Amino acid sequence: MLRHLAERLLSLGLSLFAASLVVFAVIELVPGDPAAFMLGMGATPEAIAALRRELGLEGTPLTRYLSWAGGMLTGDFGISYTYRVPVSQLVLDRLQVSLPLAAYALLLSTVIALPVGMLAAVRRGSATDMAVMGTTQLGIAVPNFWFAILLVLVFSIKLRWVGAGGFPGWEVGLWRGIGALTLPAVALALPQASILARVMRSAVLETLSQDYMRTARAKGLSRRQAVFRHGFRNALIPVLTILGLQFSFLLAGAIIIENVFFLPGLGRLVFQGITQRDLVVVGSVVMLLVFAVIVVNFLVDIAYALADPRLRRPA
């Protein structure tokens, strides 16, 4: 297990290093001068040069990369060009929305998908199975922003049960904050639940065909008992992969949903940074999201080893 953990930690470090090089290179290739963009067309060369020095845009690419990467390691993400405040402060403020939103959506997706997928697998070929497969196909095909707009039309405009957007802040109360995130979380969770339910169904069906499942049935267990006692844990291996990828997507890929519901999250911060050419914000937040994706995949690898002891044995 220790060898497995050390290998995954080494892979995590190398992945982060490679990702930092790619993110920095992409930002370097963005055309135009951020200082000239901020000061406008009437800016003098002297003013542009002074602002470039203030923003740390001078020096060789290697020097700037080392300064940027070193700052990231110490928690210093730099100063936003637009907001003139530390990027770390912006990130912490936006994480209070994006992180609960991603966790809420993942919880809804898991709670919906796992029992539905198992039900479809246990009743393979029945009307229930066909209904589940048809519904999940529809959920995959329909974009989540369409779900978001539909939810706003029904629950905010027609029924007036919740607000159409915005986030009041956690200081006004836990339930009001959760209420503001419910529609965005549902819009994010429905397509992901459709994917996860189909993966769960396939994993359980594959598990049912294994020899140890037939042995369990021969010992007198019913089909349902065999699935829950012996098949569920082994079926979790591919499901864990999807869960890890889904959390990464929900955290990093909610730009459209956050804009539909006017949520001040990381996705909207990246979108605003791109439109305002605030490259310090874009680079830092993108690298942070990459870090989150890589760490989640690392945790999924560890979960593999815990769920399947065979993965802990040396080759």
Image (spheres, rainbow, N blue to C red):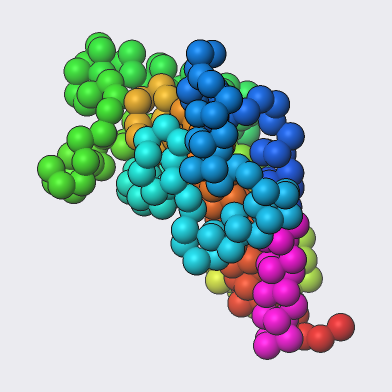
Q: Residue drawn at (44%, 40%), measured in percent from left and top? A: 80
Residue 222 drawn at (x, y percent) = 58, 65
> Quick check: is 15 in the magenta stretch?
yes
Q: How many numbered discs sit on the rendered protein?
A: 0
Q: Residue drawn at (68%, 67%), measured in percent from left and top? A: 12
Residue 313 drawn at (x, y percent) = 77, 85
> Quick check: is 225 in the magenta stretch?
no
Q: Would you say residue 9 is visible in this rendering?
A: yes
- In screen coordinates, is 34 left or right of 147? right
Q: Specify the principal SS of the magenta part.
A: helix
What are the residue bounds of the magenta stretch? 1-18
Q: Residue 233 appears in which quarter of the rendering?
A: bottom right
- In screen coordinates, is 171 left or right of 129? left
For residue 157, above or below residue 145 = above
For residue 28, above or below residue 76 = above
Residue 97 drawn at (x, y percent) = 34, 43
